[in-house]
Amino acid sequence: MSATRPAPESPSKAEAGAAPGRYETVVGLEVHAQLKTASKIFCCCSTKFGARPNTQVCPICLGLPGVLPILNERAVRFAVMTGIAVGGTIAVRSVFARKNYFYPDLPKGYQISQYDRPLCSGGTVEIHVGGAWKRIGLVRIHLEEDAGKSLHPEGRQGVNTTLVDLNRSGVPLIEIVSEPEIRSGAEAYDYLIRLKQILVYLDVCDGNMEEGSLRCDANVSVRPRGQSVFGTKTEIKNMNSFRNVERAIAFETERQIRLLESGGRVVQETLLWNADKGKAEPMRSKEEAHDYRYFPEPDLLPLDLEPPWIESVRSALPELPHQVRERLTRDFGIPEYDAEVLTETRALASYYEEVARRSGSAKLASNWIMTEVNGIRNKEGQSIEEFPIRPDRLGTLVRMIAEERISGKIGKQLFEMMLTRPEDPEALVKSQGLLPIDDEASLRAIAREVIAANPGPAAEVRAGKERTFAFLVGQAMKQSRGRAHPEKIQDALKKELEAT
Amino acid sequence: MTKKPDPLETAESIGRAVRNRERSAVEVARVFVERAERSAPRLSTYLHRDGARTLEMAAEVDRRLESGEKLSPLAGVPIALKDNLCTHGIPTTCGSRILEGYLPPYDAHVVERLRAAGAVFTGKTNCDEFAMGSSTENSAYFPTRNPWDLDRVPGGSSGGSAATVAALEASLALGSDTGGSVRQPAAFCGVFGLKPTYGAVSRYGLVAFASSLDQIGPFARTARDVALLFNEICGRDERDMTSRSDATPIDLESLERGVRGMKIGIPRDLLSVGVDPEITASLDRVTKKLSGEGAEILDVTLPHARYSIATYYLIAPAEASSNLARYDGVRYGFRAKSDDLQTMYASTRGKGFGREVRRRILLGTYALSAGYYDAYYLRAMKVRTLVRRDFDQALLRADAILLPTTPTPPFKLGEKVDDPLAMYLNDIFSIPASLAGAPALSFPSGRTRSNLPIGLQLVGRPFDEGTLLRIARTWEKKSGDPLGVPPIANGGART
């Protein structure tokens, strides 16, 4: 599971991949998201990741002679949910089409996809870069099947071996195509983060880029600022992380500008991102010279969706990131920045809500999660679900601090203990002797000890040197291991200083 | 006139006798296996035939009946399967080198249904490679011969299935019909052949040629037997999203009700393309007889039907070019040796496919290519809609349309192999119903002076196969004996 993402970009980083000076970067992204269905899009085989090669296959996803596809309704529902979530228009009739090309991991010799009549058109994803919100328009979202995987192991010397694993063949995908409205690598990065967040909130995709459940290709071009015509674009493939997308766009932007500045011309081509070299390299032209010969898939009827069904999906849609964000700022009165951090995942937002409710202090709860909880999680690489302190215990802790029954300092000690111990903070406070000291007699006793141990500073205070008083307070807190009531100990010190 | 067929030979009576335990399934199977052993080598009807396996299946049927299991009317009936129907563990080559030695790991829907019904399989019948052809000469293995004249073709692509039923090597057979591949060989071999409404029979396990046109259909020697086999295979199957629940079994007794008050349309405009006079005469004879039985004969027009061949030869190859892409040598079937992937693809497909299949793949690839799609494929799809509307219109007035199945009687082997266009034109009367998705039945209407079978075709409304069979049944009863038995099935004795 992924840890929290780093705090929003610093302004210098936000410019990464943005064209310097006279040029403007134009980026459109094509994202493939694997849908989290239990079975494949056209057969009953499992979609589970990581099984032994070619163990999750059947005649249908192997493309054996005579088989026919049977459409998985759950995949349709997930695609429709996504379309609605981004505000797109769901087509009451969409059409599957065959995309024809030869490749060893494409068992039928064609991929079943959608072409001129996709499931969803339009919609937007809102991004937040450099302190401002911006809407990135979507062209379309369509359903399709995944291909298998080609593996090229080190063969015997001089022998090129390709192995094909068809477990992934037929796994449902949605392709989400953005308008060319992204203007920098940083915007592309944030777009991907936001899109993934929506997919994960909807629980239609696990968003795991390492396992290939989210894949992204980028179309990149540059043009002089103020020009409305697009420059010639290149397509970059093979970027296996969001950061690599950002880097690849920055690289390609620079390359294109350098080319144009030196009087050259950008050639429309497909590039492969090489993360090790930090370079995008041209694909062999033979591999990209495709005429896919799309035509309507005769084995599937047009996909007709009844408007009432679409409405039922809409009304059953879970809360989306922006809705949760707005609700947190509204109901808990926390700053927008806090809401942003706390809604990173739906689970984190729920965690926060429970802590806020139990503690009765929304802002304090937010501070504790953003700093203490996320601090540990980032260090350990934990998801909030894996975090050992559940929200009921943290809620109690925060309440104790909010009600000033313990100091923040004691709170932190308790928090550290709670990471490895199952007890409730109330119980820990007692068993660990961390109860605050606030009775007059005990506080006066501590004050006396501190004054006796620090005659010099005490004399300075008596002589009117106020700054040194803070030193004595610090000593008293130290003496009591932070348990002394912070205000009352000051009274006690003053009284003892006067009395002696 | 030929000798009346032994009642044993109708599937209906075989099934009844087996279920009533009057004859064992094994006894029946032995008769057919022995006959096939005599005639099949001369006719080349089968690509895979295993008499021992057929007898084993029959023995299993006897055991099931013994144990009190209720079986369908097809229990113990010997049925042949076209070699493009997948059979678990039994070779399925589609008449192609590229699938030589291929053993499917599953049964087609229809095969599964027939196994459950207790049918006994006689073998896998020869066909034009991937069902592309009208003579069975495009089989990569050998051509099949017409049981009525061994120098002539049995039609195609389901030539083996038609010939094996005509020669009494099997009581029934299944074929597949994309542009006439059941009806045309049925006509050439003098048996009944039905192309059901598109969607009436699941295509699951039928090796695809042109998905939007392919339908599995029965061959039989009587109209009632056609219904019997159709009833066993029709209906919705979850594994074929284009299959429909509208297809329901036909009540056999309804076939006996005659044609009084029925309206039968003749598409005179289409017949002007040129029909052999003996076939025209047969059409007139049948028309007169049906009229005498109380049917009303009227003229209908199918104005766009004459564009059918051009339309069909864009749509079918386009779909085929995609459907046949999977035969790439990577996972199963034939693979040509080579050093790199591109050469392996090219040479596997170049050597594995025959001329006609390569021709259609090229044609279809071209029709779908960027820049040509609108002019060819898209336009063809529009014309297809017009053809379908023609039938809808005509069938508002008529209950069925009667026309020849083919413009000529069976031609000689080798006569058209080098002239693909002449071969394609043989399908002029069968293709329109394919484009419309309408049910169409070819029934034997008589024989030419040189004793070659003539078939006529009835086309009906979607899912109204029953009406077609009822009309054909009426003719069958009133005509004396249109069917006959070819000489080869009588041990060579001339009749």
Image (tube, coloured by chain):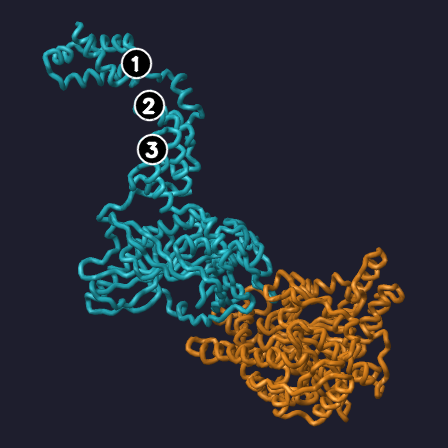
Q: Is residue B484 visible?
A: no
On screen, residue B436 versus residue A426, left or right, reads right
Q: Position of residue A285 (x, y in %)?
A: 37, 69
Q: Using the rendered image, report if marks 2 and 3 lie on a common chain.
A: yes
Quarter of the image that includes the N terminus of chain A: top left
Q: Residue at x 30, y 25 (%)?
A: A408
Marks 1/2: CA distance? 14 Å
Residue neighbourhood size for the residue with mark 3, other residues' Cα within 10 Å, grouped as few (<14), some (14–19), many (≥20) = many
Q: Dots 1 and 2: beta carbons under 8 Å?
A: no
The three-letter amino acid code for the residue at tag 3 is Ala
Q: Mark 2 belongs to which subunit?
A: A
The three-letter amino acid code for the residue at tag 1 is Asp
> Color of chain B here?
orange
Marks 3/1: CA distance? 27 Å
> Dot 3 corresponds to which residue?
A362
Q: Reply above or below: B162 against A29.
A: below
Q: Earlier in the sequence, mark 1 or mark 2?
A: 2
Q: Give the image quarter of residue B394.
A: bottom right
Instruction: Find residue A403 and name its label.
Output: 2
Q: Position of residue A194 (x, y in %)?
A: 35, 50
Q: Mark 3 belongs to which subunit?
A: A
Marks 2/3: CA distance? 13 Å
Q: Earlier in the sequence, mark 2 or mark 3?
A: 3
Q: Residue furthest left?
A: A463
Chain that is coloured cyan in the picture: A
Q: Earlier in the sequence, mark 3 or mark 1?
A: 3
Q: Residue at x 19, y 12 (%)?
A: A494
The three-letter amino acid code for the residue at tag 2 is Glu
